[in-house]
Amino acid sequence: MSQVVVKITQAAFSPDPVIIHPGDLIVWTNQSGNPQDATSTDGGVTFQTGPLPAGATSLPITFSNPSLGIPYASTRSAVLRGKVIVK
């Protein structure tokens, strides 16, 4: 099990896509200067970080099942979109 950090900037999630293995954890850290979040595009059913103030880091989220792509976005920004790949 390992932990990957995804940075939230004004323009992008980085890295994107995030490629991990089953059982790995992801945390998102908000470096955008504005409140942001990371929410799966299925309405947050698969995962959601909740609102992250500028400078904050999310709680770790574990991804257990292989997936060719879990799309996600910030509900607070039209440009912030990403994908988690679990292989």
Image (cartoon, rainbow, N blue to C red):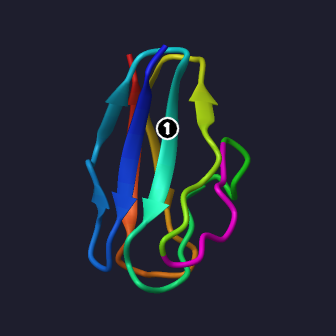
For residue 6, above or below residue 33: above
- Identified at 60% across, 54% down, the residue is 58
Q: Residue lying farthest front?
A: 55
Q: Is residue 49 magenta?
A: yes
Identity of the residue drawn at 42% across and 81% down:
78
Mark 1: few/some/many CA within 10 Å (<14, 14-19, 20+): many
Q: Quadrant of residue 49?
A: bottom right
Most foreground residue, 51 or 39: 51
When the figure is inspected, residue 64 is found, relative to residue 42, above or below; the finding is above
Task: Give the residue furthest to the right.
Answer: 45
Q: Position of residue 81 (x, y in %)?
A: 38, 63
Predominant SS along the magenta part: loop
Residue range of the region highlighted in magenta in the rendering: 47-54
Residue 70 or residue 60, whichever sits in front: 60
Task: Decide: is 65 above or below 17.
Answer: above
**Residue 55 lies in the magenta stretch:** no
Percent position of residue 25, x then y: 52, 29
Residue 10: horizontal and vertical position, in percent? 32, 80
Q: Residue shown at 69%/63% (left/top)?
A: 50
The quarter of the picture where residue 76 lies is bottom right
Give percent across and percent down for residue 19. Answer: 32, 30
Q: Is residue 53 left or right of residue 44?
A: left
Q: Quadrant of the C terminus?
A: top left
Residue 49 visible in the picture: yes
* Residue 40 seen in the figure: no
* Residue appearing at x 35%, y 77% in the figure: 79
Q: Which residue is mark 1?
A: 26
Left or right side of 85 for 44: right
Q: Of the residues shown, which amino acid type is indicated by label 1?
A: Ile
- Which secondary structure, mark 1? strand
Q: Is residue 78 above or below residue 16?
A: below
**Left or right: 83 with respect to 14?**
right
